[in-house]
Image (spheres, rainbow, N blue to C red):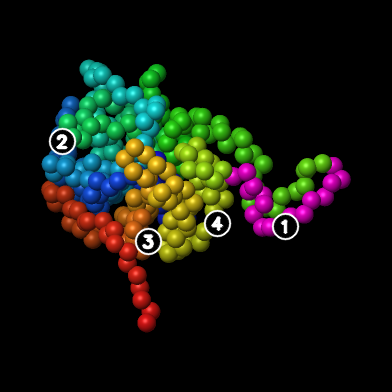
Amino acid sequence: MCTSISFLTKDHYFGRNLDMELSYGEKVIITPRKYPLKFRMADELKEHFAFVGVGIVIDNYPLYYDATNEKGLSIAGLNFHVSAVYYDKTDDKNNIGAFELIPWILSQCSSVDEARDLLVNTNVVGIDFSEEYQSTPLHWMISDKDYSITLECVQDGMKVYYNPIHVLTNNPEFPMQVFNLNNYINLTREEPETRFAEGFDLNKYSRGMGAIGLPGDLSSMSRFVRGAFARLNSLCGDTEGESISQFFHILDSVSQTQGCVKTENGFERTIYSSCCNTDKGIYYYKTYNNSQISAVNMYNENLDMDTLITYDIIDRQQIKYLN
């Protein structure tokens, strides 16, 4: 289970929670402009936009979970295991594996509009990276500072939805997630008015009672509602410190505590939370075991290289002792 959000103050920020029961050795990965991007069924790109994000590197190939390019376009792939359908190869479109989709779009597109145009001629095919790393059922949120869209490959074809919520979780399909917000039409950040019965006054005994009914469970549909409520009602200053702090607070409202969701492979937890300043190319993150924020600035590297640049995730708690 995962959650991604897009957030605008003075700068634009994009990030996500990665919620899983185990880690695969994630790293911060920078793909420079001259790293040769090879695709299984499309032409190699020898020069392209640079991008930064988190993923794993297998056989010198970056398998990104989320990333942002130097033009400020961002993508996150989220688990969509019930509904995702990938397609057979076709001769009239670019055939791209799901594991290739993030570099395919970020290497060529500078905006959501350009990404939508590219997707018109893109077919997401059902191929595996390898026998060990098989294709993961995903859907994606793609954002720039102006727009967000949700991309879903389902039984009746590829769907691209305008996403005015700027939030994405997992199943069910995006239109159902948005429609479900109608069930929470009475939620408010204000003090609630008594509507129980005419002339019947009730005591507002606590702050926050306007949000009674906000779902607190850990399902993806409930996290979508909770993340949308937090993001859409967020008040934030426009400094870098205020912006990244607020971003992580929003993600914290939908994070997974280890021990609360049991799977067949263990207990789900928020492996990492990320927040990228897409204007400055700074990728911030924290992990389940390390709540201190770490950062990698893409522009402090030579982006004209032809080899990947990686940083190990710092997953051991960092504490600043004051005495």
The chief SS type of the magenta part is loop
Residue under pointer 3: 291
Residue under pointer 1: 205
Sequence-earlier tag: 1 or 4? 1
Q: Secondary structure at mark 2?
A: loop
Amino acid type at mark 4: Leu
Residue at 26% over, 22% down: 93
Q: Nearer the viewer, mark 2 or mark 3?
A: 3
Q: Are marks 4 and 2 in contact (CB under 8 Å)?
A: no
Mark 2 → mark 3, Cα distance in angstroms: 36 Å
Let me know if residue 286 is in the magenta part: no
Q: Secondary structure at mark 3?
A: loop
Give how far across and how far down residue 149 sits, in percent.
42, 36
Residue under pointer 2: 38
Residue under pointer 4: 235
Where on the picture, by quarter, is residue 4? top left
